[in-house]
Amino acid sequence: MAQTTKYVIKYKLNGERRFEFAQLESGTQEEAKAALEALHGQTDDVISDVSVSKAL
């Protein structure tokens, strides 16, 4: 099993600022966006302005 680290993902969902915590392997924007898409499912929601940082 790969080592994961807790990250906070800040993003906009349909223009509304939101944040989520996720266990990610590398903390890249691509990995974070994939985690958000999995969380929100296959909807017409627009995910934008994704930024990732390690949780404190």
Image: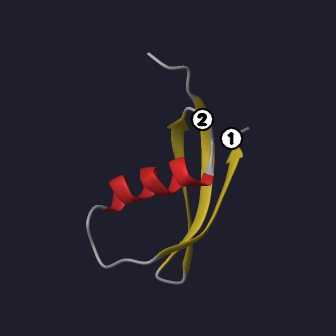
Q: Are marks 1 and 2 in contact (CB under 8 Å)?
A: yes
Estimate how packed mark 2 is, as few (under 14), some (14 to 19) or many (20 or more) residues with alpha carbons within 10 Å.
some
Q: Residues within 10 Å of mark 1 (few under 14, many from 20)?
A: few
Placement of 23 over or under 9, stated as above or below: above
Residue at 28% across, 61% down: 41
Looking at the image, what colour scheme do you see?
secondary structure
Residue sticking out furthest to the bottom: 15
Q: Label 1 sits on what residue type?
A: Ala
**Residue at the front extreme, as displayed:** 30
Residue 18 at x, y = what percent? 55, 67
Label 1 vs 2, first from the N-terminus: 2
Which residue is nearer to you in this view: 16 or 24? 24
The spot of residue 38 in percent (x, y) is: 34, 53
* Residue position marked by numbered label 1 in the rendering: 55
| Residue located 56% across and 32% down the image | 25
**Residue at image mark 2:** 6
Query: How many angstroms separate mark 1 from mark 2 (CA)?
Result: 6 Å
Res 36 quadrant in image = bottom left
Q: Quadrant of residue 1?
A: top left
> Helix or strand or loop: what does disc 1 sit on?
loop
Q: Residue furthest top?
A: 1
Q: Is residue 17 left or right of residue 14?
A: right
